[in-house]
Amino acid sequence: MSRKRILSGMQPTGELHLGNYLGALANWVRLQDEYEGFFCIVDQHAITVDYDPRVMPSRVLDMAIAYLAAGIDPTRSVVFVQSAVPEHTELAWYLSTVTQYGELGRMTQFKDKSDQHQDNVNAGLFTYPVLMAADILLYRATHVPVGDDQTQHLELTRNVAHRFNTRFGKPLFALPQPVYSNTPRIMGLDGLRKMSKSLGNHIAMLEEPKPLWKKLASAYTDPQRTVLEEPGRPEICNVYRMHTALTSAEKIPEIERQCREASWGCGHCKKELQSSLEATLGPIRERARALRADVGQVHEILADGNARARREAQSTLEEVRALMGMTGGAK
Ligand code: AQP
């Protein structure tokens, strides 16, 4: 393998939000310069919670458009769909035999998701991290971009890879390293919880300017700053935190000063944030619009990515089957 390789993916469960963009996608876009990127739309993960099969194809397409509009470059990176590469689920089965029941039970995401979806605590939700390990190991990714909620899954992947290599006597899988996001966590507009679409506290990545301003105008700030004269406390203000992720670094000291000296009201500070958001999201929105007007091109990119991913996956799976004695009866 000539270059270091990253693999990452997102579930096609609905519109992407600013947290997904800053915490994951923007990072992937930057990493393309240094790594060979495999960016997957993980539709098989998305079916571990209730979903509508009729809308899944359009969600996958929306996700592909979002990846490309955000700056994933299909001439440098592989953009593909998990279910188009059946080797993911085959490898997951093999890896499940070197994964312990107890270690899956300790996954905090399983605990959270089974609390959230008490009427559907299915086995897929429980074995989800094994499929995720297969996603990564199938492409022998050397690195995995992670947000702060995925460290535990990557650790499991490393343990499973190590156990497989030891059990079958060959260092087939490199133990993937984490690459941490520059913006590991964006808080929601309520300022209290992680930005999340199920909490309804999000700004969509493709949000149009008018609804964006409406959301921003009611965003939580420093609760003590109810009148203009009160000095602000940027360290506890979520709008300020968003500035640090979106506004150019040279402007940040000025924003901090205007807040502490109470020379700007919160409305002014939000207007500044609105223009930073527009500078980042406006061009993405335009590219998404152009891609949507030419979905044939998006389908071609996916077909090409699926084929490239499949070739890699098949070559890994051949080695896995041989090591595990899954030869179809041949010697
Ligand atoms: N608030 C966030 N800040 C930074 N990064 C975030 N990510 C998600 N939320 C934030 C990163 O986005 C990628 C996909 O994560 P996910 O699978 O948790 O995304 P999601 O399920 O679409 O996010 P939601 O909105 O939280 O979904 P619901 O509410 O439906 O469960 C990951 O890299 C994650 O770190």
Image (spheres, rainbow, N blue to C red):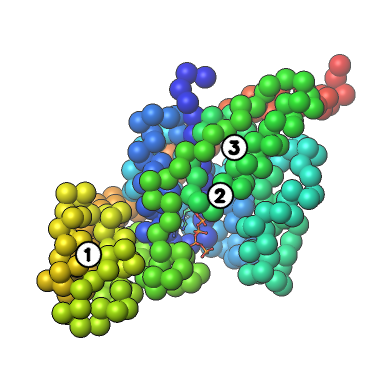
Disc 2 residue type?
Gln
Of the pair 6 and 314, the residue shown nearer to us: 6
Disc 1 residue type?
Gln
Mark with earlier residue (3, 1): 3
Of the pair 162 and 205, the residue shown nearer to us: 162
Which of label 2 and label 3 is nearer to you? 2
Relative to 283, residue 53 above or below? below
- For this orientation, the residue located farthest to the bottom is 227
Q: Position of residue 150 (x, y in %)?
A: 56, 49
Relative to 272, residue 69 above or below? above
Q: Position of residue 167 (x, y in %)?
A: 79, 27
Relative horizontal placement of residue 3, taking residue 85 as reference (left or right): left
Relative to 199, residue 180 above or below? above
Q: Residue under circle 2?
A: 150
Q: Residue under circle 3?
A: 136
- The residue that appears at 52% across and 38% down in the rendered structure is 178
Q: Position of residue 25 (x, y in %)?
A: 40, 47
Crowding at label 2, few (<14), some or many (≥20) Cα neighbours within 10 Å?
Answer: some
Q: Which corner quadrant of the image does residue 187 belong to?
A: bottom left
Q: How far is the residue under mark 1 from the one under mark 2?
A: 30 Å
